[in-house]
Image (cartoon, coloured by chain):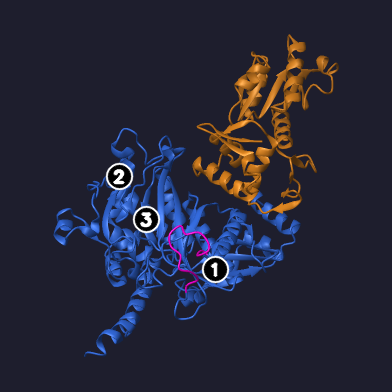
Chain colours: A orange, B blue
């Protein structure tokens, strides 16, 4: 798993703790780097250390948090922690770092980021997806989806208008352990289109030689 | 509990599902089902559901009759037809009490063969054209509903409504239909399903056969996939469009080689041609199947390949320009009364053997194969498909590939069962004999 790390020269303690917990640190200079270098499977987290330039670091933390591109963990020593604004990160860690605590906090952040907040019904036009009950409704009528169809539709509806490649969809929706070839995505998109029905099938558009877009 | 299973449990609860049908397939391709209630669902996922396998054709010897059906949560689907409200189904794998896959379970046989293909880096995709007849009833004489022909539109095509209802039901179950039309023979219809990975497609075909029959029943008529129900007109075929993918790439396509056919494609076709006789026993498994495989009715008889030649066993349809992913081969022998899990298994094994052994692709057949004389065909090394079930069984029995692909248990059971069928047929005095011989002999 890849974790974005700021500043570009993180403390050796942080790097060691990350590696020990199974994360590969990738140094990022700014918000643009976080976006540009984002792996296909997404960042496990952005870890921001408050060092020599805390203003820039906090600005980056806030921005990434607002955009929601990765969960943000802010690392500060005792002196700096006292002055930290509570909205600076999704979680905080005191330095010197305890590797076990870092592993635990990152695990918790990732679980929170992948889980859905309770009753966060996802809506797109007359489509409703209820992640708590796994139910999808079209204009109020239940849609009979298989699990993977549901997951794919939920991913699409949660990320409208963006173009996704087949590989991205495979790793984001199916996960690492899936082995079945990228054509699986095409097959599922067709099944979804069939179930959405004629008038709504066009919600999923094929972007030639790239992938798919929803909405 | 894994996410997939949790999804099924939640859906059953939310949608008020009262019965879950566990589906599996016997060796001859008949769909079997037993129902469980939601209360048993968790046990079914964790341990599987017990049943007595000795009652199922081709399953087990009596001393090992205890078996477990393990539902595949990815196939959970609420059934869309009338009278099945609040009923859902899942396909099952059949395992022995010790958890090992049961060797007589066709779905496991296909999974094992797909696993082998995956080991070589391939995923196997299939797109079928399913043909069937609508008859007025189940009487001994088929009574057609219309006198329509290929692509005919109303008023001859009275079955349009049945076809449309079938497509709607299939689409609700996530089986996309590419096109549907009236076929060549009176009362004959065709559904072209969008290609899918072979395991899903075998499941889809089992579902499609049931859906076609269920919808016909709703309308008070009868649908049949019998290979040749009416003498003198085209029978029911199941043309299969086949392709292998390596990840995102169609492994059959190579712009640099002749006709855009890669080395993999050429090997695959060569393998199909080489093993055509033995695999026919499985792709055309009934006495009646061989009444379809005769000249003059758009069914293959000769073992040859061609690009645009409907008389060839293997046809390579022209890929759409700029769409290399659509490169595929069409295998035209199978009929829709086959067991799709076993048919896909033997076809895949034949193709892979051609690839692995580096078999040489014979030259393309150019003319109409039916117009050639026997000598000309012999000179071109064009063989013939088995003419009867007995011939096909002989070829199958001699094939090591078939035994390895199907597994010893299933291979032997199939041969035994089919030899008996042939034996019963041989003892039968047919209408043909009475009509031809009785007046003169």
User: Reading the chain from its start, which is encountered first: label 3 or label 1?
Assistant: 1
Split into 4 quadrants, where in the image is the C terminus of chain A? top right
User: Reading the chain from its start, which is encountered first: label 2 or label 3?
Assistant: 2
Q: Is residue B152 magenta?
A: yes
Mark 2: which secondary structure? Answer: helix
Q: Which mark is residue B347?
A: 3
Residue B140 higher or lower than B208, as above or below:
below
Determine whether label 3 and label 1 are within 8 Å by CB: no
Q: Nearer the viewer, residue B148 or B107?
A: B148
Q: Determine the chain carrying the residue at label 3.
A: B
Estimate the spatial distance between the alpha carbons at disc 3 and disc 1, rounded to whole Å: 26 Å
Q: Residue A158 vs residue B125: left or right?
A: right
Decide if residue A95 is in sight here. Answer: no
The residues colored magenta run B144-157
Majority secondary structure of magenta residues: loop
Mark 2 or mark 1, which is nearer to you? 1
User: Reading the chain from its start, which is encountered first: label 2 or label 1?
Assistant: 1
**Same chain for the residues under marks 2 and 1 in the image:** yes
Q: Is residue B399 magenta?
A: no
Image position, residue B7 (x, y; %): 68, 52
Q: Residue B304 vs residue A189: left or right?
A: left
Image position, residue B243 (x, y; %): 41, 46
- Crowding at mark 2 (Cα within 10 Å: few <14, some 14-19, many 20+): many
Residue A38 higher or lower than B210, as above or below:
above
Residue B77 higher or lower than B432, as above or below:
above
Q: Determine the chain carrying the residue at label 2.
A: B
Q: Which mark is residue B70?
A: none
Q: On the image, numbered disc 2 is attached to which residue?
A: B266
Estimate the spatial distance between the alpha carbons at disc 2 and disc 1, rounded to whole Å: 38 Å
Image position, residue B212 (x, y; %): 54, 65
Q: On the image, numbered disc 1 is attached to which residue?
A: B213
């Amino acid at each position: 798993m890849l974790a974005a790390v700021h500043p570009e020269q993180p403390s050796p303690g942080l790097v060691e703790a990350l590696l020990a917990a199974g994360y590969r640190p990738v140094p990022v200079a700014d918000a643009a780097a976080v976006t540009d270098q984002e792996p296909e499977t997404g960042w496990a987290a952005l870890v921001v250390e408050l060092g020599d330039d805390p203003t820039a670091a906090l600005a980056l933390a806030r921005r990434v948090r607002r955009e929601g591109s990765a969960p943000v963990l802010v690392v500060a020593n005792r002196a700096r922690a006292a002055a930290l604004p509570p909205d600076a990160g999704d979680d905080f860690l005191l330095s010197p770092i305890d590797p076990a605590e870092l592993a635990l906090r990152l695990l918790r952040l990732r679980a929170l980021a992948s889980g859905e907040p309770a009753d966060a019904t996802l809506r797109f036009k007359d489509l409703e997806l209820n992640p708590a009950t796994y139910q999808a409704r079209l204009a109020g009528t239940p849609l009979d989806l298989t699990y993977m169809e549901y997951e794919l539709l939920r991913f699409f509806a949660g990320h409208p208008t963006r173009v996704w490649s087949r590989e991205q969809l495979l790793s984001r929706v199916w996960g690492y352990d899936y082995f079945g070839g990228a054509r699986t995505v095409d097959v599922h998109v067709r099944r979804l289109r069939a179930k959405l029905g004629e008038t709504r099938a066009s919600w999923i558009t094929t972007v030639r030689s790239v992938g798919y877009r929803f909405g | 509990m894994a996410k997939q299973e949790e999804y099924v449990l939640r859906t059953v609860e939310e949608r008020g599902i009262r019965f879950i049908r566990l589906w599996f397939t016997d060796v001859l391709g008949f769909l079997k089902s037993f129902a469980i209630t939601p209360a048993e669902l968790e046990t079914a996922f964790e341990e599987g559901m017990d049943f007595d396998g000795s009652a199922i054709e081709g399953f087990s010897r009596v001393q090992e009759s205890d078996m477990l059906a393990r539902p595949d949560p990815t196939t959970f689907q609420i059934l869309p037809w009338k009278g099945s409200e609040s009923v859902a189904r899942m396909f099952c794998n059949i395992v022995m009490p010790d958890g090992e896959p049961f060797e007589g379970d066709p779905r496991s046989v296909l999974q094992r063969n797909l696993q082998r293909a995956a080991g070589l880096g391939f995923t196997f995709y299939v797109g079928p054209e399913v043909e069937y007849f609508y008859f007025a009833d189940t009487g001994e004489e088929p009574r057609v509903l219309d006198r329509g022909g290929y692509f005919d539109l109303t008023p001859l095509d009275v079955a349009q409504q049945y076809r449309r209802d079938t497509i709607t039901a299939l689409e609700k179950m996530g089986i996309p239909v590419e096109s549907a039309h009236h076929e060549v023979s009176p009362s004959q219809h065709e559904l072209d399903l969008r290609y899918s990975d072979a395991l899903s497609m075998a499941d889809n075909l089992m579902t499609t056969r049931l859906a076609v029959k269920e919808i016909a029943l709703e309308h008070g008529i009868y649908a049949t996939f019998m290979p040749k129900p009416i003498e003198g007109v085209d029978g029911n075929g199941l043309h299969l469009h086949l392709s292998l993918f390596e990840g995102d790439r169609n492994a059959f396509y190579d712009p640099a080689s002749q006709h855009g056919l890669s080395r993999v494609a050429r090997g695959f076709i060569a393998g199909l041609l080489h093993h055509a006789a033995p695999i026919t026993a499985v792709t055309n498994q009934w006495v009646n199947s061989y009444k379809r495989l005769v000249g003059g009715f758009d069914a293959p008889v000769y073992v040859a390949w061609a690009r645009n030649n409907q008389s060839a066993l293997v046809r390579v349809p022209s890929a759409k320009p700029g769409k290399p992913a659509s490169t595929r081969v069409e295998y035209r022998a199978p009929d829709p009364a086959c067991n799709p899990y076993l048919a896909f298994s033997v076809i895949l094994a034949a193709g892979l053997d051609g690839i692995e052994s580096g078999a040489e692709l014979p030259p393309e057949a150019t003319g109409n194969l039916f117009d050639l004389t026997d000598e000309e065909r012999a000179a071109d090394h064009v063989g013939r498909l088995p003419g009867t079930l007995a011939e096909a069984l002989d070829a199958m029995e001699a094939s090591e590939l078939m035994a390895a692909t199907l597994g010893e248990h299933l291979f032997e059971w199939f041969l035994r069962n089919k030899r008996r069928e042939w034996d019963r047929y041989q003892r039968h005095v047919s209408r043909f004999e009475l009509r031809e011989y009785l007046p003169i002999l």
